[in-house]
Each structure stands twice: as C-alpha cells, then as structure tokens.
Image (cartoon, rainbow, N blue to C red):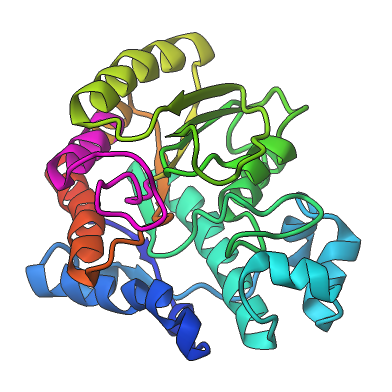
Amino acid sequence: MLPIAYHPIYKHPLPEGHRFPMLKYELLPQQLLHEGIVTTQDFYTPALPDMQHIMAVHHKNYVDDLLNLTLDPRAARKTGFPLTAELVERELRIAQGTIWGSEVALQTGIAFNIAGGTHHAYSTHGEAFCLLNDQAIAAQYLLDNKLAKKILIVDLDVHQGNGTAEIFARNNAVFTFSIHGKTNYPFKKEVSDLDIALPDNTGDDEYLSILGDRLPKLIDTQKPDFVFYLSGVDILDTDKLGKLGCSINGCKERDAIVLSLCHKLGIPVQCSMGGGYSPDIKTIIEAHTNTYRVAAGIYP
C-alpha cells in the first residue's frame, strides 16, 4: 500500500502558457493505476487545512493577501502564475495533503503527495511556481503536535530549496539538506544546514556517489525521527530548466538510496514530487512513476 494525496483541483485549468507544467499531475495518477502500483483506495482527497497550520510557517499578512487576492502585483508575478482563487485553493489542498501524508507515514512508513515540493515559498512570499511551502508546513505541524522531535528534509530537486532554508534557518529541530545544481535557479542561494552544489552536467556516477556517502552519515549524526523527501526529476539530462546530467535509471537509483535507507532504519518518510520539465511528457511521467515503483518494491 502506498498512501497518496491527490485532488482533482491539482490539475485545475490554467492559461495555455502554463498548461504543460501541470499536465503531469493529471497523467501520473492514471499511470500508477494503469500499472497496478496502486488502487483507487490508495488515494486520499485532501480537504482545506486549518489555517493555523499554514500560519505556523507563513506570515499572517502574506496568507491574508493570498486568501483575499490582494497580493502586490509584483509579488504575484514572482510566483510565475496568475493569482486566482482556484490557484490558492490548490496550494492549500496540497499543503493539507502533505500534512495528511506525514501523519499516515507515521503509521505505514511512507506516504506520497502527487503534487507538492513547493520549496521556493518563503515565510513572507512565494516565487517560482510556489505559493505555500507544503513540506515546511507539514514539518512544523509534526513538531507542534509532538509527533516528531527531529526532522530531516532531503531536497533532491535540481533547484535549491531556498524557501525551506529560510523558514527553518533558526529552527534546530529541522535539518535542511539540499543537493542541487550550482548554476541553477535560485541564482542567489539561501543557506541550508547542508548544501551540496553540483557543477553543470554532473552525471549518475558522481551524483549517486555523493548521495550514497553523505545521506547515511547525515542520518547517523542528526538522528531524525521523520524524513521529508522532495523527489524532483529535474535532475535529468533532458530537463529544460535543469543543468545536471542524470539519466532515468540514475534518477531511479537516487530514489532507491533514499527510500531503502529510510525503510531499513525505520524512519517514516513523506514524499512530494517536486519539479520535472523535460520536453517530452513521457519522460517526466516515467521518472516520477519510477519513484513509486521503487517504493512499491521496498515497502510491503
């Protein structure tokens, strides 16, 4: 069983120029069902969250501006999307899906959000297609409700999780770990607890060697009792917005390193999908589906 948060609003209509990045949220559930990796009973439809959980991470004025659609036009442009009530609702439900997934993972060992990984959302503003930071919200939820004492966020999207780093910069209960492209957006990086910035065209061998060496040591020293995994597939050599050089198989092996280690050590893990911008949608779906294939082979 792989518990998955998904809601039809994840794929709500957008202007034509914004359609392609959203298509994967429509196709990925279909692929998982087609292959029999999951059944319809494995999907959870997230409700709207308690706004106190959102404001435990994001400043009230910013949240109010989102809800009232009164965000400054320049701030709205930084998000990359036209600000609409439907978009805000989508982000709220994604955040609730990750909160739910974190609770379920405590019982089952693992849970997924078809969307999420909105790591460019800061406490006070959004940017780069991210309005609310779903994994940061869920991490703070676990801490506030004493469901976890030490959290490790493993961010393996090609872009540094700058918003996540800012949100937890002074929170010793959350350790932020990011492996990303050195010359990729954001061009001005924040400081995570551990950043590994890779040069352009870094391929499978180097990437997997670094991850396989650093992650076990990090878990050993930090001793987290919960892991959030951002499994972006924009590390692929085909990605339009990424500059790394990993293959489909290398990306799959990356997922295996993270998930097998969490399973072996008995650490619950919540996975959000993050980015993926290869020109061929089939490549994106294949890479994201691999994350679930790997999990299905590890978790009973």
Residue at point 75%, 72% (across, down)? 76
Quadrant in the picture for the C terminus: top left
Q: Residue 173 appears at what percent x and percent y?
A: 67, 26
Is 244 colored magenta in this rendering?
A: yes
Is 133 colored magenta in this rendering?
A: no
Residue at point 38%, 20% (across, down)? 215
- Please tell me how many numbered marks the rendered image carries: 0
Q: Residue 55 appears at what percent x and percent y?
A: 80, 57
The extreme right residue here reads 61
Residue 47 in view (yes/no): yes
Quadrant in which residue 61 is drawn: bottom right
In the image, residue 26 above or below residue 36: below
- Residue in front for this viewpoint, 117 or 267: 117
Residue 300 in view (yes/no): no
Residue at point 19%, 62% (across, down)? 283
In the image, residue 280 above or below residue 18: above
State the extent of the magenta-drawn residues as a range.
Answer: 231-258
Assign the magenta stretch its main secondary structure. Answer: loop
- Residue 19 horizontal side relative to residue 251, left or right: right
- Residue 4 horizontal side relative to residue 2, left or right: right
Q: Residue 26 appears at what percent x and percent y?
A: 33, 79
Residue at point 59%, 38% (across, down)? 147
In the image, residue 150 above or below residue 231: above
Quadrant in which residue 118 is drawn: bottom right
In the image, residue 86 above or below residue 287: below
